[in-house]
Amino acid sequence: MELHPHEVKVLKALSNGEWSNPEKTSSETGLDSDAVLRAVSWLKTKEFIESPEEIRIEVSLGDEGIEYAKKGLPERRLMNAIGKEIGIAELKKKVDSETFKIGFGWLRKKGVITFSEGLVKIIDSSETEDEKLLILLKEKRKLIVNDLSKKEQEAVEQLKARKNVIKLSEEKIIKFKATKKGISASKSLKIGDSLSQLTPELITSSGWKNKKFRPYDVSVYVKPEYPAKKHPLQVELERIRRIFISMGFSEISGNFVESSFWNFDALFTAQDHPVRDMHDTFYLKKPSKIDIPGFDRLWKDVAKTHESGGSTGSAGWQYKWDKSKSYRTVLRTHTTAVTARYLSGLSPEDLPVKVFSLGKTFRNESLDYKHLPEFYQVEGIVVDKNATFRNLLSILKEFYDQMGFKVRFRPAYFPYTEMSVEPEVYFEEKGEWIELGGSGIFRPEVVRPLLGFDCPVLAWGLGVDRVVALKLGLKDIRNLYVSDLDWLRKTKTQF
């Protein structure tokens, strides 16, 4: 094994088998401390030296400790005021309230006084270990905790329980020595003039022609470097965006705070539907109302559709629709609110249309391994007079294929689509199919009031977080949002 010249110099300096440190080795080799540390790191990976990590803890006096070292601990000052015994009322008159409050508590804690029937008696007035340590710190200024006796270390723990009495600081001690393998290797090593890199100067001067280049040892362990990178969830969100754009979709967006009209009413969700309850939806106190673009043009048709089906041929929900409830503000429970707004602005001349929305949604969910109160959802619609249910299934299958999942479809029910299906993907580790959202063809009760004419509208809303968690091999969706630097550094992401 060929070593770097710096490694050879350091190993030669350690050939006596004794402990050394960066400063001493730097002086002996003529290398700066950084070069010595780099060489030590390389030699350690090759098992030529050992360098155990040692943390030294230093203790010194804090602001209160300096005062106590001069005047004595509050309990010592209180003992001086007690003498042998004294009434508690008289004792309080002899010292200030702060000294009494702190000192009396510590005297009882240390068990050096008795207190009965208003009389305080001293049963042990000898100097305590924490007092001795204060005096020692006053003289030495700093002490190494590791070098203290067991009783002195216990005194450190006692003083540490007090505010600003002592200060503790950690210092990493770097020391190293050659192993038997290193000592043996150092005997046959020579400091040569081989090069580890080709510099511009060597090229221009042709000096490289007379030099020997040191080969790289690819088997040597090198500490991993973790460069900055995007969060895995953000990477997958961008992947989803690229998939839909590659399929010919355009992206639309909306606000987190939405009116109940766009979030529920426009989507033919009855005003007494359980999904509108407080335990499912986050309602806002401020603002309590919100402007609704196009409301004057749309609300009457939406109201008639809810009450009797309007012109759709449906019976509606058979109740009196309340206009005031449409103004209530919510944190959007799905990005379908975005597509509902978009749908209301289309005309026949705009068709066909393919759009998607990707963003955060909010629901008052109980936390578990597959549910969060806020999560990402990708929503999309296709508005085309020739669109069919087969087209919908084809789009969703293509999406999940590109995401790398096996998908199946299960019949489902939603208030605003008919026919409706739930896409499910197979989770290998759990051996089960996981439902990831809803999809279907918008009902006439949604389309006619918003669009103004009949036309097939394919629609879907898919939970993104679960897809990403599955893709990353996470068993718990909550781990996507845990600030675990080790996981973030080591998780592989593909752009």
Image (cartoon, rainbow, N blue to C red):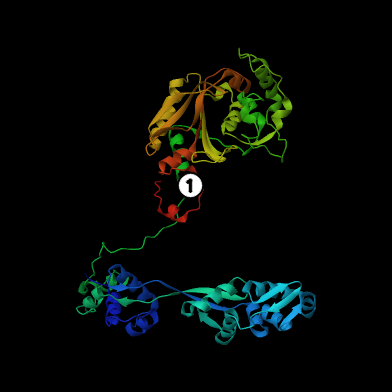
Q: Where in the figure is residue 124, as x and y percent of width and height?
A: 63, 81
Q: Where in the figure is residue 87, as x and y percent of width and height?
A: 77, 77
Q: Taking 276 as reference, is 198 left or right?
A: left
Q: Taking 318 as reference, is 493 left or right?
A: left
Furthest residue to the top?
313
Q: Where in the figure is residue 127, as x and y percent of width and height?
A: 61, 83
Label 1: how many Cα within 10 Å (few below 14, some 14–19, many 20+): few
Q: Is residue 352 visible?
A: no
Tally the numbered discs.
Answer: 1
Q: Taking 203 as reference, is 175 left or right?
A: right
Q: Where in the figure is residue 29, as x and y percent of width and height?
A: 32, 82
- In the image, residue 354 sits, relative to residue 34, either above or below, namely above
Between 90 and 490, the one nearer to me in the picture: 90
Q: Quadrant of residue 39?
A: bottom left
Q: Secondary structure at mark 1?
A: helix
Reading the image, the residue beneath label 1 is 479
Kindly identify the residue that appears in the image at 37 percent across and 60 percent down.
Answer: 224
- In the image, residue 155 sits, relative to residue 311, either above or below, namely below
Q: Is residue 54 visible?
A: yes
Kindly identify the residue that appears in the image at 60 percent across and 31 percent down.
Answer: 337
Furthest residue to the bottom?
139
Q: Taking 125 as reference, is 421 left or right?
A: left
Furthest residue to the front?
117
Between 310 and 159, the one nearer to me in the picture: 159
Residue type (three-letter) at the residue carrying disc 1: Asn
Where the N terminus falls, by quadrant? bottom left
Q: Quadrant of residue 325?
A: top right
Kindly identify the residue that appears in the image at 29 percent across and 75 percent down.
Answer: 7
Between 129 and 139, the one nearer to me in the picture: 129
